[in-house]
């Protein structure tokens, strides 16, 4: 059997006023996942927990993302997360606050023949 990429899901999330990178990252992953219902594992006769889900999050300050909070979003499978530099930071006009935009990509792999 071979591990094969079956799905790529992408999403965007924001924290408008709090500059909370974890909140933006969680929202980005939810955006990627919650727009569909994956039945690919079932379609090939495998349980949903056999999925291997690799998440990549892009934010301007990767060290400020709580990876465990991001992984907690995933309902099934073996999960990994990598946080890289990306996304956007947009300060308000007075410089007192920042909007954070995070991007997420979730790759789903299954071990199939």
Image (tube, rainbow, N blue to C red):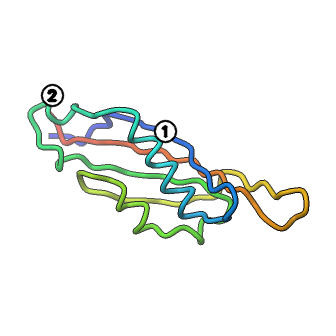
Callout 1 crowding tier (Cα within 10 Å): few <14, some 14–19, many ≥20: some
Return the residue at label 1. Answer: 10
Indicate which disc residue 43 carries.
Answer: 2
Which sits in the foreground, 111 or 19?
19
Q: Is residue 63 above or below residue 81?
A: below
Q: Marks 1 and 2: CB-CB under 8 Å?
A: no
- Could you give the CA–CA distance between mark 1 and mark 2, rounded to whole angstroms? 22 Å
Q: Residue at x 60, y 52 (%)?
A: 102
Is residue 79 toward the left or the right of residue 21 in the image? left
Q: Residue at x 61, y 51 (%)?
A: 14
Residue 18 sits in quarter:
bottom right
Q: Residue at x 67, y 64 (%)?
A: 19
Which residue is the extreme one toward the left? 45
Q: Residue at x 76, y 61 (%)?
A: 98
Is residue 91 toward the left or the right of residue 85 in the image? right
Q: Could you say where residue 63 lies in the image, as x and y percent from the top left?
A: 59, 71
Query: The N terminus is located in which quarter?
Result: top left
Which sits in the foreground, 49 or 37?
37
């Amino acid at each position: 059997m071979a591990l094969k990429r079956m799905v790529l899901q992408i999403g965007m999330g924001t924290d408008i006023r709090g500059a909370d990178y974890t909140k933006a990252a969680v929202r980005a992953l939810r955006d990627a996942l919650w727009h569909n219902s994956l039945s690919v594992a079932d379609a090939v006769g495998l349980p949903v927990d056999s999925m291997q889900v690799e998440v990549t999050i892009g934010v301007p300050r990767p060290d400020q993302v709580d990876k465990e909070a991001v992984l907690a979003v995933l309902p099934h499978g073996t999960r990994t997360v990598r946080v890289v530099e990306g996304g956007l930071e947009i300060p308000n006009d007075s410089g007192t606050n920042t909007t954070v935009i995070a991007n997420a990509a979730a790759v789903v792999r299954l071990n199939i023949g």
